[in-house]
Image: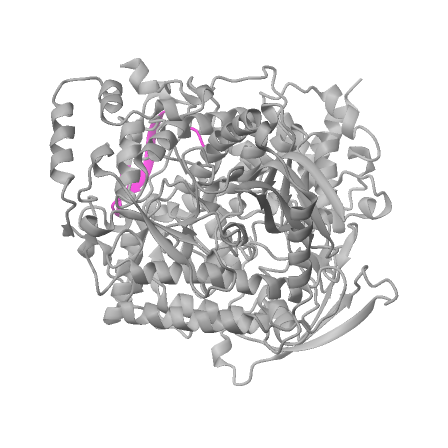
Amino acid sequence: MNLIPTRDLSTKEVPRKLRITVLRHNPSEPDITPYLQTFEVVEGEGMTLFIALNEIREQQDASLQFDFVCRAGVCGSCAMIINGKPALACRTLTRDLPDHIQLAPLPGFELIGDLSVNTGKWMRHMAERVQTWLHRAEQTVSLDALEERQDPDLAEKIYELERCIECGCCVAACGTAQMRPDFVGAVGILQLARFKLDPRDTREDADYYQVIGDESGVFGCMTLLGCEDVCPKELPLAQQIAYMRRQMALVK
Amino acid sequence: MEIVHTDALIIGGGLAGLRTAIGVRRRGFDAIVLSLVPAKRSHSATAQGGMQASLGNSVKGQGDNEDVHFLDTVRGSDWGADQEVVRMFVHTAPKAVRELAAWGVPWNRVRAGDRHSVVDGKSVTLKEAEGAHGLIDARNFGGTAKWRTCYVSDGTGHSLLYTMSNQAIAEQIPVHERMEALSLIHEDGRCCGAVVRNLATGQLLVYIAKAVAIATGGCGRLYRTTTNAVINEGMGAAMALETGIASLGNMEAVQFHPTAIVPSGILVTEGCRGDGGLLLDVDGNRFMAEYEPEKKELASRDVVSRWMEHHIRSGKGVKSRFGDHLWLDIRLLGKEHITTRLREVNEICHYFLGIDPVEKLIPVRPAQHYSMGGVRTNYTGQSLQLRGLFAVGEAACWDMHGFNRLGGNSLAETVVGGMIVGEYMAEFMESSSWDFRFSAGVVQQAVTAQQKLLSSFTGPENPVRIIEEMRSIMSEKVGIYRTGAELREAVTQLQSLLQRAKHIGVKSGARGANPELVSAYRAGRMLKLALCIAQGALQREESRGAHFRADFPLRNDRDWLCRTLATWEDPEQMAPTLRYEPLDVMRMELPPGWRGYGAKERIEHPYTAQRQAEVEAARNQGKSRYELQRELMPFEHLLPESLRGRNARFQEDSV
């Protein structure tokens, strides 16, 4: 857990003046080349990048594009490069950053404009490709009967791997993903690990091998583990990639 | 102009919309889901605590069944709900939980043997039955007689949305992301599609469909302080309102959640209190025990929020530079519980407050959370006035929440609603193909109207300022405590904003997304919704559920046992037209009474005593619970056939 050092802004005489530099480009205006633009914002108590960026858009530049939805760190919309590292902007407090903040869109995804990228399209494609749903033997289940029992510990372990919010930070921090557009990323491998853990899923290792048993899957990972460093949900990505790779290597 | 044809057009990619789409698809129809954002980013993901369904597996859920869930929900609604719809809902909720389990949701499961828990501030040890081991567990929530809220840690919404969304992908349902429906296309009282704007490119498109469902969630962003995601601006309901035909029900019924953190308004789940957390004031005093000796922190949300505001107003709040607040104390639950069952709460406290809730108190204050009102529909989810238009989930008012929703009933409603409405949409499409037509003229007119609107923003007014002013008015004058004087002021001020909204200017001519333009065309729509809430609240001279009038503090069944219907026939009118739809006491399974918490005094309906006597006479005949229920208020015939089966329960079956 990343504990925030609490610094009481109220004791400071003058609030900081933040300089926020944004890498800007609007693909709908192809004649304008990408450029850096710097905005000045007076820091407020408890200010997050969600607050700062909205203030910029409301008061300085109404055309600035970025994505926020839940603004509570659970929906995964607002991942961007913050001073060189992928992170969720909504829960990044400005007090943890220097006076000069540099923002850029997440690499590895189609740019919609400025800080907004199309993670949705990428994730849907990944989900279709590796089939991120439970493959059951029977097609229909009686909704009137008692539910199938599940071991309480197993249920918790599955949830542990299901906490991914598809924010795209792991893809942005991944060397392979930057070189191979078809790489499923830590996000894809983790999601398959979740179904592999679930005894109700009828897929066998050979089936998983079909979808991630090559260099666009587990064997593309160079073990740089940038994914694990930046995952905002602190998911066990390195462990699960290693586990899946070992399992896939054993498939005959 | 690109024209997309489909059978069912589902507007909204959250749980309700996705489950509706799956239902329609399974009946052999094509469905397209439109979503402002990637479906997995919908607001459903932020639901933390869980979903109510009377499985009765846990020891504290023993004896639970549809009847108990029904009573809790109707009492929670302060008798504003449609009791037949509540029956349909409580009957289907266990099926929804079981379907989700079969699709992969890792519900927390009962562990046989000793279970340590905190109840009413004290540490207790419960014993779970051997026979329940591995069945779906439940936690305690407010306003319920049993522990009934099924949960996945405190990421229940996330887990459900991912499972549902992946299921929709498995069933090859296309989700058109970053698409905003601007207006409904309709002809002769029949809805046949929508004019849609691509939020990434700015292009307009037309979708033609045999049936349309609005599943756009709530409208919390009409308020300054809300737990809602930034996309919850009520545009689905506004679009229905702007048809001039469809009506909105009970828009004045707005829920304020007791525990939003200060100042950001981010929610921490009711599960904190359900699991044993306490509310404390500036003196560290557990004040809810004084106001509500029976339910304490676990009275319904409207009651707890009202007492919190009252307590703050009586000077017992904690002062801060963001205004006064109270404390939520979950320290007594212990580190293990907090880091496993309340881990999202734990993260929120660390990231947004910089505190560790294992050791520190959480600053909380009530914030807007949920809209009980929405597009008024019948029990099938279809609009009463516009054929072919359906609504489901928070965007709808079918109406199972009345004037206050219980925690855990909204997540359940999204899925249950989707299961039921999906079936009825399919039935509608099967039986009404004769009725489906659209003429090029009507489509062209609808497109031209939006094009005209989008190019009309050349005035001096700033849309963002207007929306900000609206939010302040709503939070200050249409909040938890309402008075006639303040509501009248609110209506006047909102009307003047609506006038100003006709002169909005957009400075940025940027092609593509253009967020400023988005604010511009939404401002007027949001104001219309805000006026439905404020005007509805002004005219409703009683207090019921979350609608509290300090100048009319009693619930008045004699004059106000009715549902508010708002329409906006003429685009130029400056206030909604309000009508009232009476609720029939003589058909209620549970006649109006005291909720078991909150105010005991009320003005009775003249028929209540008679109906009460009938109900009691029926109860004394010694019938089984199923027979008795059928006699009092038959509902099974209202359900799609596939959902009528009796729910198995481990205790009932083993007794």
Query: Which residue is drawn at the image coordinates 30% and 30% (left, top)?
Result: B61
Query: Could you tell me if residue B363 is visible in this image?
Result: no
Residue B384 percent across, percent down from the top left: 43, 40
Nearest the viewer among A144 and B115 is A144
Q: Point out the image quarter for the C terminus of chain B.
A: top left
Query: Which residue is drawn at the image coordinates 45% and 29% (left, top)?
Result: B97
Q: Is residue B112 magenta?
A: yes
Nearest the viewer among A117 and A174 is A117
Residue A184 percent across, percent down from the top left: 76, 38
Apparent side of residue A71 relative to residue B95 in the rendered image (left or right): right
Which span is picked out in magenta?
Answer: B108-124
Number of numbered discs present? 0
Apparent side of residue A61 relative to residue B256 in the rendered image (left or right): right
Apparent side of residue A54 relative to residue B201 in the rendered image (left or right): left
Look at the image and name its color scheme.
Answer: one colour
Residue B275, located in which quarter of the rendered image?
top left
Query: Which residue is drawn at the image coordinates 42% and 17% (left, top)?
Result: A145
Residue A130, located in which quarter of the rendered image?
top right
